[in-house]
Every structure is written in C-alpha cells, then in structure tokens.
C-alpha cells in the first residue's frame, strides 16, 4: 500500500464515523460522503547544504511566487570552495596546454624522422615513437584532470546556488520549521509550501460506485454555515482499498468567487451526489 493510500486511509477512518451509503430508492439519494480539500502541489523544502540560516524572508501564510527567495544559508564557505575549484581549473587548463604542446612537438619530430628514411636509424624512430606515446598519455591525463576539475566547479557552484532557497511554484507558506540564525543540517526541513490550486478527495463505498463516474457532479458542503459549491469527478482509483472497502475519488473544484477565499487545504467537507448528474 502506498504512502498516499496510508495517509488517505487514516483520514478516512478518522472521519467517516457513522456516515454510510444508503442505496438510492425512488427519489432517495446517497447520504453524504466525507471529503478532504487537498492542494494539487505541496512540498517540504529542505536544505541541501549545511550552515547558518542567515535569512528567512517569509512567515506563515505568506503567498509566494515561483523563484521568490524564501531563505538563505550562509554562502561564504561554499563561495570559498568555488573559488578554490575555479583556481584548480585554471591550473588544469595550463597543464593541458603544456601537455598538448609537448604532444605536438613529439609528433612533429616523429614525422620528420620518418620522412628522413635511410638517414636515421630505427633506434631513433623507436625512441621518438615512445616519446610521442608518452606525451599522448600525458595529454590524456591532463584532459581528464581538467574535466574532473570542471565537474568539481559545477558541484561547488551548485552548492552556492543551493544556499538560496527559492519557491518552486506559486503558493503559500503552510508551515515554518526553523528561525533565522539557527544552524541547519543537510536535509533539515525549512518550510512547507502548498500550491494555490486545490482539489477534492473523497472515498466512496464499493456498493455506491454505481452512482460515481468521470464527469459526475457532486455538491460540496464545508459546514452548515457556508455556501455549498460544486465539483466534477475527474479521477477514480482503479483499485479498491482492501482495508476499508472504499474507492478513492478526486474531483475538480468549481468555486464561485464568494467562497473561493474561504476554501483551504485540509478542510473536511460533506460530498453528495448531485441528482441527475
């Protein structure tokens, strides 16, 4: 069973209580199901570097835009490492240039000796050939060293970039796990971000699934004091949860402007099948 199924099953079993399905008979409808409003996108942002959190630019509930800076880990140690790696690349580039020049020289000398024909000994050609092969190996090693140094620069540059934590999508800050000034470890959770787009998830007893299909309209009621709104089923699990004997269903919300601001991720709602849908 997946982690999402475990989570949803826990929500369902905790909320379902006495709600049950009653078969439609004449003009009777199903009793309401329990649903939960969930964000389409959510993420716990964790630090991929270690250091002191020098800046935390958002608070709980703040709305953010894609790419917005949310927090900064002290980058100085990583910037020094990047400088050292870049210096190593310059050294490797210089060594490759020298090795390439030696390779050209030994290659040209070998060509001259071969063109001289009978005027040079086989020993001279053999020695020149060995020198050329040695310089070829040296050039290959220098090339590999440069590539390795460049890879280290890329990694160091990535670490510098990782000291700035940015929003991966438009959304809102749902939780703040740290405060500015604390030391954070690799993998430490910093913030939870939830996207602005919300969906409805609910579970339907197996015997009630004849009333639910793709495109079915459902009435969503947050509580008695709020205006109901509609949602349209656009996702049905292909399997039955064996523990609860329910099928998990998702629906796209159709929120009128007067209730849009009051709908939040995590809300529990009642879901009823719309007559004639």
Image (tube, rainbow, N blue to C red):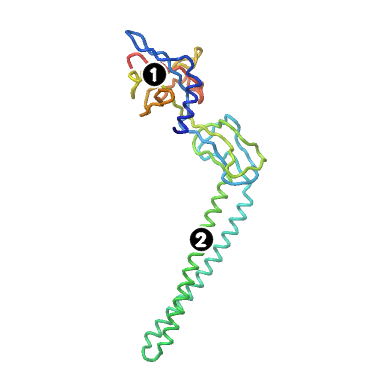
The one nearer the camera, 54 or 117, is: 117
* Residue for point 61% across, 53% down: 79
Total count of labels:
2
* Above or below, 51 relative to 88: above
Q: Position of residue 249 (x, y in %)?
A: 40, 25
Q: Which residue is mark 2?
A: 148
Secondary structure beneath label 2: helix
Q: Position of residue 251 (x, y in %)?
A: 40, 25
* Above or below, 90 relative to 239: below
* Residue for point 41% across, 13% down: 31
Q: Position of residue 219 (x, y in %)?
A: 41, 17
Residues packed near mark 1 inside 10 Å, few (<14), some (14 to 19) or many (20 plus): many
Q: Residue furthest right?
A: 181
Question: Would residue 177 be found to the left or right of residue 13 on screen?
Answer: right
Q: Going from the N terminus, do you reach mark 2 or mark 1 first?
A: 2
* Label at residue 145: none
Quadrant of the drawing holding the C terminus:
top left
C-alpha span from label 2 to label 1: 59 Å
Q: Residue furthest top?
A: 26
Q: Position of residue 16 (x, y in %)?
A: 47, 18
Q: Which residue is mark 1?
A: 218
Q: Residue 191's quadrant in the figure? A: top right
Quadrant of the drawing holding the N terminus:
top left
Secondary structure beneath label 1: strand
The one nearer the camera, 237 or 228, is: 237
* Above or below, 111 relative to 142: below
């Amino acid at each position: 069973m997946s982690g999402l199924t475990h989570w949803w099953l826990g929500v369902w079993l905790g909320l379902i209580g006495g709600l049950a399905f009653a078969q439609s008979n004449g003009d009777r409808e199903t009793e309401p199901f329990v649903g939960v409003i969930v964000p389409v996108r959510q993420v716990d942002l964790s630090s991929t570097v270690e250091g002191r959190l020098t800046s935390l630019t958002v608070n709980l509930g703040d709305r953010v835009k894609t790419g917005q800076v949310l927090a900064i880990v002290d980058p100085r140690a990583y910037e020094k490492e990047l400088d050292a790696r870049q210096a190593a690349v310059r050294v490797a580039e210089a060594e490759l240039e020298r090795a390439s020049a030696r390779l050209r020289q030994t290659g040209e000398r070998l060509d001259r000796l071969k063109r001289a024909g009978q005027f040079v000994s086989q020993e001279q050609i053999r020695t020149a050939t060995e020198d050329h092969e040695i310089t070829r190996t040296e050039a290959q090693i220098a090339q590999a060293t440069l590539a390795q140094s460049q890879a280290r620069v890329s990694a160091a540059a990535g670490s510098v970039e990782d000291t700035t934590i940015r929003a991966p999508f438009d959304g809102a800050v749902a939780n703040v796990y740290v405060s500015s000034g604390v030391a954070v470890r690799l993998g430490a959770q910093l913030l939870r971000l939830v996207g602005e787009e919300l969906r409805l998830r609910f579970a339907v007893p197996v015997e009630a699934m004849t009333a639910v299909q793709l495109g079915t309209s459902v009435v969503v009621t947050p509580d008695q004091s709020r205006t109901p709104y509609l949602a349209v089923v656009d996702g049905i699990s292909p399997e039955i949860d064996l523990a609860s004997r329910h099928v998990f269903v998702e629906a796209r919300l159709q929120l009128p402007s007067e209730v849009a601001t009051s709908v939040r991720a995590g809300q529990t709602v009642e879901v009823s099948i719309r007559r004639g849908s």
